[in-house]
Image (tube, rainbow, N blue to C red):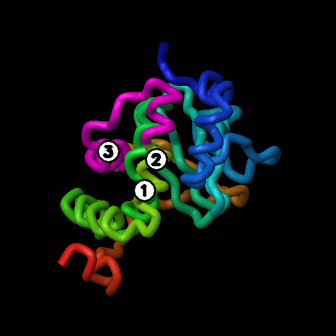
Amino acid sequence: MPLTPEVLTANCEAVAWLGSFDVLFAPDEEPWFAIDGIEKARQVGSDGSGGAFVLLPSQDVLYVSSEGRAGIIAGTFEAFVQLVVARPYWLVVLKFSAGGDLAEMRRAADALEATIEDEDDVNEAREAIRDALDLPEAGDPVGALYDAVAASDAIVRATDGSPFTTLFNRFSIDSNPMLRTAVA
């Protein structure tokens, strides 16, 4: 059975573990953005920074940040959960993507993985979520994230009508001393 928001939310243990990765499955009541061509967006979750996860009619998962960035991050809800489990810092990988460079995203993911302070806790959460949901491990989560964001064609607008920008940010890990030394 494919993983859906309903299947996931019925599994309290998995929802609790995903909460430790900053993914909450309680959508906002009031929409603060609009998506061109979609009457009513189906927000399926949020994160601690105010961002929203939206399941589109195409089954793609769209992330809308509270800072004016948006883009498709996964082709299915299951792929979204696999991404969060494999790379809970996926949003930071996009921040340090050097404008959408896959090699730089891979460097950022390696650096971020090397800086995890509570590695045992993170690995325990990863295993518990995969077991609870019978979820296969993602093959190439950073490559899949890159492909999804690069192909994203959803146009998200703020309430004033201004369009959001891409999730790819211009920074590289070389601009962050902690990350730069983590992969040195």
Inspect the image, locate mark 3, and give the three-letter code of the amino acid beneath it: Pro
Q: What element carries label 1?
A: helix
Q: Is residue 41 left or right of residue 71?
A: right
* Res. 148 visible in picture: yes
Location of residue 155 with respect to 173 vertically, above or below = above
Q: Residue at x 53, y 48 (%)?
A: 63
Q: In this view, does 26 lie to the left or right of 140?
A: right
Q: How crowded is mark 2: few (under 14 residues within 10 Å), some or many (20 or more)?
A: few
Q: Residue at x 68, y 51 (%)?
A: 33
Q: Kindly report which numbered mark, 3 or 2, lies closer to the viewer in this rendering.
A: 2
Inspect the image, locate mark 1, and give the three-letter code of the amino acid beneath it: Asp
Residue 124's disc is 2
Image position, residue 111 (x, y; %): 29, 69
Residue 141's disc is 3
Q: What stretch is highlighted in magenta?
A: 127-149
Q: Which residue is drawn at 35% across and 75% down?
A: 171
Q: Residues within 10 Å of mark 3 (few under 14, many from 20)?
A: many
Gap in Å between the C-alphas at discs 2 and 1?
6 Å
Q: On the image, numbered disc 1 is attached to which residue?
A: 120
Count of number-bearing discs: 3
Inspect the image, locate mark 2, and give the three-letter code of the amino acid beneath it: Glu
Please identify the dominant SS of the magenta region: helix
Image position, residue 71 (x, y; %): 47, 49
Q: Which of 146 and 41 is in front in this view?
A: 146
